[in-house]
C-alpha cells in the first residue's frame, strides 16, 4: 500500500519541525500584549490645546520637568516616569530642589484646554518665583478633523 505518507522501505528521521504549536503560542502572546498594552499607559488626563508650532530642538539630551494642570485644576509634577500630585504651594519647593541638583533642566507646562487661563498664569508665576527663567508650553499638533472656534 503506497499512500502519500509512505516512505518506501527505509525508516530515516523526518527533518521537518512542526511549527503549529509555536504559531499558537505567538498568537496567544499577541492577544495578551494587545490587551495589556493600553493598561500600561499611565498619567494625568490632560486635553492639550492643538496649535501649530515648532518643537523645541535643544532638549534631546535633557529630561524636562513637566508641571501639569488637569481639567479639575489639580497640579501634577513629573520628572521622567514619576508623576506625583502636588499643591500649588509645593510646586515651588520641588522645582527649586530639582534645579539645585540639575540647573540646566528645562521646565514645561501642560495645561488642559478646559482649565482657566488664570490657573495656567498662576502656575507660570509660581515657577517664575521659584527661579525658572524659561517655561515651555506643551501643545498637540492640530488634527484635520478638529475644528477650533
Image (tube, helix red, strand yellow):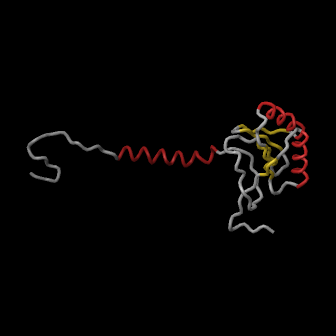
Q: Residue furthest front?
A: 58
| Above or below 130: residue 139 | below
140 vs 59, nearest the viewer: 59
Q: Position of 40 compared to 8: left or right?
A: right
Q: Position of 60 compared to 16: left or right?
A: right
Query: What residue appears at the point 67 percent right and 44 percent down from the top-left corner?
Result: 60
Determine which quarter of the picture holds residue 19: top left
Determine which quarter of the picture holds residue 87: top right
61 vs 50, nearest the viewer: 61
Q: Position of 9 compared to 37: left or right?
A: left
| Above or below 88: residue 141 | below
Q: Position of 20 compared to 118: left or right?
A: left
Query: What residue appears at the point 83 percent right and 34 percent down from the top-left corner?
Result: 94
15 vs 52, nearest the viewer: 52
Query: What residue appears at the point 69 percent right and 64 percent down from the top-left corner?
Result: 143
Task: Check the picture and name the quadrant holding the C terminus.
Answer: bottom right
Residue 43 in picture, x, y percent from top left: 71, 44
Amino acid at each position: 500500500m503506497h499512500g502519500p505518507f509512505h516512505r518506501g522501505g527505509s525508516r530515516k528521521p523526518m527533518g521537518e519541525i512542526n511549527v503549529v504549536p509555536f504559531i499558537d503560542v505567538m498568537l496567544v502572546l499577541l492577544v495578551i500584549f494587545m490587551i495589556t498594552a493600553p493598561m500600561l499607559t499611565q498619567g494625568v488626563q490632560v486635553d492639550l490645546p492643538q496649535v501649530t508650532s515648532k518643537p523645541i530642538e535643544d532638549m534631546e539630551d535633557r529630561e524636562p520637568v513637566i508641571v501639569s494642570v488637569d481639567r479639575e485644576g489639580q497640579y501634577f509634577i513629573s520628572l521622567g516616569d514619576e508623576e506625583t500630585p502636588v499643591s500649588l504651594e509645593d510646586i515651588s519647593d520641588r522645582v527649586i530642589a530639582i534645579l539645585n541638583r540639575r540647573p540646566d533642566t528645562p521646565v514645561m507646562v501642560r495645561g488642559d484646554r478646559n482649565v482657566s487661563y488664570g490657573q495656567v498664569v498662576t502656575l507660570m508665576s509660581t515657577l517664575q518665583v521659584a527661579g525658572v527663567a524659561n517655561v515651555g508650553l506643551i501643545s498637540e499638533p492640530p488634527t484635520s478633523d478638529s475644528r477650533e472656534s
